[in-house]
Image: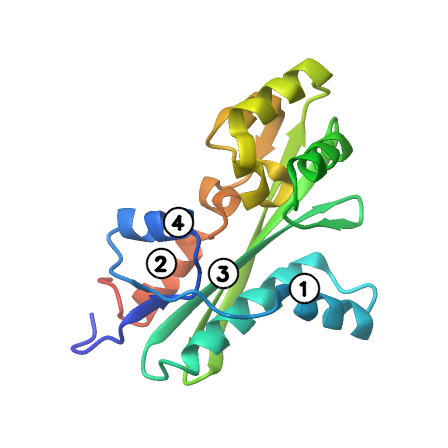
């Protein structure tokens, strides 16, 4: 480990990401990034309508890291983002329970991808970034099962892309899951930890 490793700052308001890092024994400060995610996505698609959804996640993670790095240039900033892609469509967090219902119906019986990206920045410069993908299949659930889930989850369905959290009752809606658990939760933890060890921020 380096004698004076830089402080680590998580540029995210996600309680799940913070919990994952703290559970792994990584000491962090939390400072959510103030970026206009919709504007960044719109700019990417305006420049290239066929931009990959993985690139969207990577760009958002990088922009979050750079935004906070401008405020704390000597710290090592962790930016992260996750997007959901299904058959060419990019999904965003639903704005209402009705939108959540529509999203889940659109995903029902289909396989979708969760692209989770993480980036590191110092002095407003991105020095490392990567993305990992998990693939999840929703079963052909009944309207009754969907109603049950929405009633149990309540407004929490608006806090996650795809209107679900796999660690809660939404898991009953799934048929198959292929991917790393931390990627599904929104932070590809193992690649990030490996990079922090390479930089001697964590013990090797």
Numbered disc 3: secondary structure: strand
Pick the residue in front: 103 or 167.
103
Q: Quadrant of the N terminus?
A: bottom left
Measured from the top left, where is residue 111 in percent x and y?
Answer: 71, 35
Measured from the top left, where is residue 15 in percent x and y?
Answer: 39, 49
Point out the tag, 4 or 2, that comes first from the N-terminus: 4
How many other residues sit within 10 Å of disc 1, few (<14), some (14-19) or many (≥20)?
few
How far, Cα to Cα, is label 3 from label 1?
A: 15 Å
Q: Nearer the viewer, mark 3 or mark 4?
A: 4
Give the colour scheme of this rendering.
rainbow
Point out the tag, 3 or 2, that comes first from the N-terminus: 3
Identify whether 124 is placed above or below 196: below
Q: Residue furthest right?
A: 49
Check if mark 4's residue and mark 1's residue have beta carbons within 8 Å: no
Numbered disc 4: secondary structure: helix
Residue pictured at 24% horizontal, 60% vertical: 27
Residue pictured at 73% horizontal, 20% vertical: 140
Q: Residue furthest left?
A: 3
Numbered disc 2: secondary structure: helix
State which quadrant residue 2 falls in.
bottom left
Residue pictured at 41% horizontal, 60% vertical: 192
Point out the tag, 1 or 2, that comes first from the N-terminus: 1
Query: What numbered label is drawn on residue 193?
Result: 2
Check if mark 1's residue and mark 2's residue have beta carbons within 8 Å: no
């Amino acid at each position: 480990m380096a004698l004076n490793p830089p402080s680590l700052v998580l540029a995210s308001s996600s309680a799940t990401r913070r919990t994952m890092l703290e559970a792994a024994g990584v000491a962090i400060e939390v400072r959510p990034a103030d970026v206009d995610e919709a504007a960044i996505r719109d700019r990417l698609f305006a420049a290239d309508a066929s931009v990959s959804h993985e690139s969207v996640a990577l760009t958002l993670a990088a922009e979050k890291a750079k935004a906070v790095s401008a405020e704390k240039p000597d710290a090592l900033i962790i930016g992260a983002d996750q997007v959901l892609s299904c058959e060419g469509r990019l999904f965003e967090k639903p704005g209402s329970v009705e939108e959540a219902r529509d999203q889940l119906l659109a995903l029902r019986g289909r396989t979708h991808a969760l692209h989770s990206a993480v980036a590191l920045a110092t002095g407003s410069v991105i020095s490392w970034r990567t993305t990992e993908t998990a693939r999840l299949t929703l079963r052909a659930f009944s309207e009754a099962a969907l109603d049950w889930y929405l009633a149990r989850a309540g407004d929490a369905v608006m806090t996650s892309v795809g209107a679900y959290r796999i660690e809660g009752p939404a898991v009953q809606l799934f048929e198959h899951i292929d991917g790393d658990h931390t990627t599904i939760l929104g932070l590809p933890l193992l690649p990030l930890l490996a990079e922090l060890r390479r930089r001697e921020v964590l013990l090797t």
